[in-house]
Image: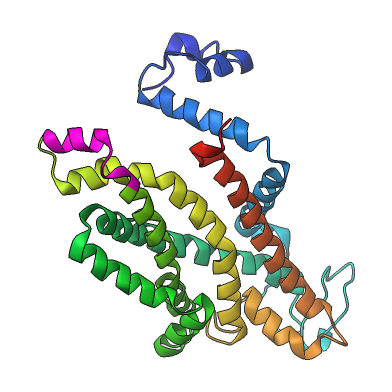
Amino acid sequence: MTIPVEHANNVGGSDLRNWLLAPDPQGWFQSSMQQFYQGWLQFRLHPLGLIGLMIIIFLILVAVAAPLLTSFDPIVQDMTGRLAPPSAEHWLGTDNFGRDVFSRVIYGARTTLYIIILVTVIVAPIGLLIGTCSGYFGGIVDEILMRVTDIFLSFPGLVLALGFAAALGPGITNAIIAISLTAWPPIARLARAETLSLRKADFIAAVRLQGASATTIITRHILPMCVPSVIVRVTLNMAGIIITAAGLGFLGLGAQPPWPEWGAMAATGREFMLDSPWVIAAPGIAIALVSLAFNLVGDALRDVLDPRSLQ
């Protein structure tokens, strides 16, 4: 479903807004766009959420445009200029190998986004599937899946990630696997709670009476209802994912040298933090700022997507 051609040709700011606020949407596309627009209007009421969103968008733009923002290679060493303080040439100084800290920070944003995207792609479907199956089927299925989930939840996430990363070996791929193995249980618990409140609803009973299979009910009726809560949870988990990834990098279990990664940069910079504080300050501030941004966006999304918060 698209905007009619004769209407699209005259779409201005007011026409588009009227289309988004039409009381009788024509098709699923217009209805979806109206829901998105209403959500955006509510999201705009959260100034801190907007600040967090701008920081995340800035992070993405920096990661994409990294080669255009600096002329320095983040890997090439220059021992003649090691530990140089911030200057017009090196905005954030250089590290102990003479590499430009600014270029390493912005290229490290690529590593952070890479980890965030892959962990989210892995964790969200696994947590949703386990949680909805556990909540819908109940009985022995629920007992088995939730006891496995409880085992993972019984350990602190960072400690468990360290254990998996140590067993799998150093490397960014193994770090992503380790983080994913520790990040799905909270999502599964949330999806299970949502499913328990939905499985006895009247519309689920009606669909079941029409002969729909359990797979159809879960995938077409329950999963979509759980997605908003999961989006909020995943967004709030981003800060933990970033800090865990940085912790693994700090301990040498994440991205391997010489590739720039904020945690590994902080680990290197701690040796020079008294005489050359810029080496550790730059990646540390980046980790804190991006983690805070995801928390701010997650808090705003929770208010937008939670029906109980609507007045």
| Residue located at (31% from left, 72% from top) | 147
Residue 35 highlighted magenta (yes or no): no
Colour pattern: rainbow
Left or right: where 106 falls relative to 214? right
How far across and how far down the image is residue 106, in percent?
Answer: 68, 65
The foreground one among 150 and 104 is 150
Numbered range of the magenta stretch: 197-209
Give the vertical position of 36 relative to 280 (above or below).
above
| Residue located at (16% from left, 48% from top) | 214
The number of numbered discs placed on residues in the rendered structure image is 0
How far across and how far down the image is residue 196, in percent?
Answer: 31, 50
Q: Quadrant of residue 290?
A: bottom right
Left or right: where 175 falls relative to 82? left
- Quadrant location of the C terminus? top right
Residue 207 highlighted magenta (yes or no): yes
How far across and how far down the image is residue 267, in percent?
Answer: 68, 85
As drawn, which residue projects farthest toward the left? Answer: 211
| Residue located at (62% from left, 37% from top) | 43
Give the vertical position of 9 relative to 41 (above or below).
above
Question: In this orientation, does residue 72 appear?
Answer: no
Left or right: where 224 falls relative to 72? left
Magenta region's main secondary structure? helix
Question: In this orientation, does residue 203 appear?
Answer: yes
- Quadrant location of the N terminus? top left
| Residue located at (64% from left, 78% from top) | 263
